[in-house]
């Protein structure tokens, strides 16, 4: 029996899926729920990040342990926004400095 006969006899399914394992198993569902929860948390944090600072006059910041995850969800998107802004600023300033040094 040659290799071509074996290759045509066995069906090849895309992405490693075979007919009997098409349905997701328990681990797939756990990972999907975890990713969905992370997406909801990031969305909530992004929405809360845009809250006005005037609200601090009525509800001051407390260091209660139950409020710390919410503060972390607000702080993390701000940190990434600051990193992106600083990278854009650095590349723009570098470009202008490089062009100025070429001019003399």
Image (cartoon, helix red, strand yellow):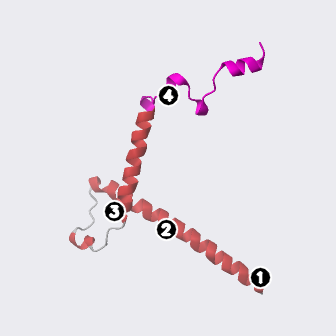
The secondary structure type at the circle numbered 1 is helix
Alpha-carbon span between mark 2 and mark 4: 43 Å
Whether residue 4 appears in magenta in the rendering, the answer is yes
Alpha-carbon span between mark 3 and mark 4: 39 Å
**81 left or right of 55?**
right
Determine which residue is flagged by label 1. 102
Give the percent coordinates (x, y) of residue 51. 32, 68
Q: Nearer the viewer, residue 65 or 46?
A: 46
**52 left or right of 14?**
left
Above/below status of 63 relative to 17: below
Determine which residue is flagged by label 3. 48
Of discs 3 and 4, which sits in the foreground? 4
Of discs 4 and 1, which sits in the foreground? 4
Whether residue 13 appears in magenta in the rendering, the answer is yes
Of discs 2 and 3, which sits in the foreground? 3
Give the percent coordinates (x, y) of residue 73. 38, 57
Q: Residues within 10 Å of mark 4 (few under 14, many from 20)?
A: few
Please report contact status of discs 4 and 1: CB closer than 8 Å, yes or no. Answer: no
Alpha-carbon span between mark 4 and mark 1: 60 Å
Alpha-carbon span between mark 2 and mark 1: 30 Å
Alpha-carbon span between mark 2 and mark 3: 17 Å
Determine which residue is flagged by label 2. 82
Above/below status of 38 relative to 70: above
First reached walking from the N terminus: tag 3 or tag 4: 4
């Amino acid at each position: 029996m040659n290799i071509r006969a074996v290759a045509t006899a066995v069906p090849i399914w895309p992405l490693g899926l075979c007919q009997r394992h098409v349905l997701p198993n328990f681990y797939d569902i756990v990972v999907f729920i975890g990713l969905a929860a992370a997406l909801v948390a990031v969305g909530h944090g992004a929405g809360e990040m845009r809250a006005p600072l005037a609200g601090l006059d009525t509800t001051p910041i407390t260091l209660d342990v139950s409020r710390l995850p919410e503060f972390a969800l607000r702080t993390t998107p701000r940190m990434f926004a600051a990193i992106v802004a600083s990278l854009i600023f650095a590349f723009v300033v570098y470009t202008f400095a490089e062009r100025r040094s070429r001019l003399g």
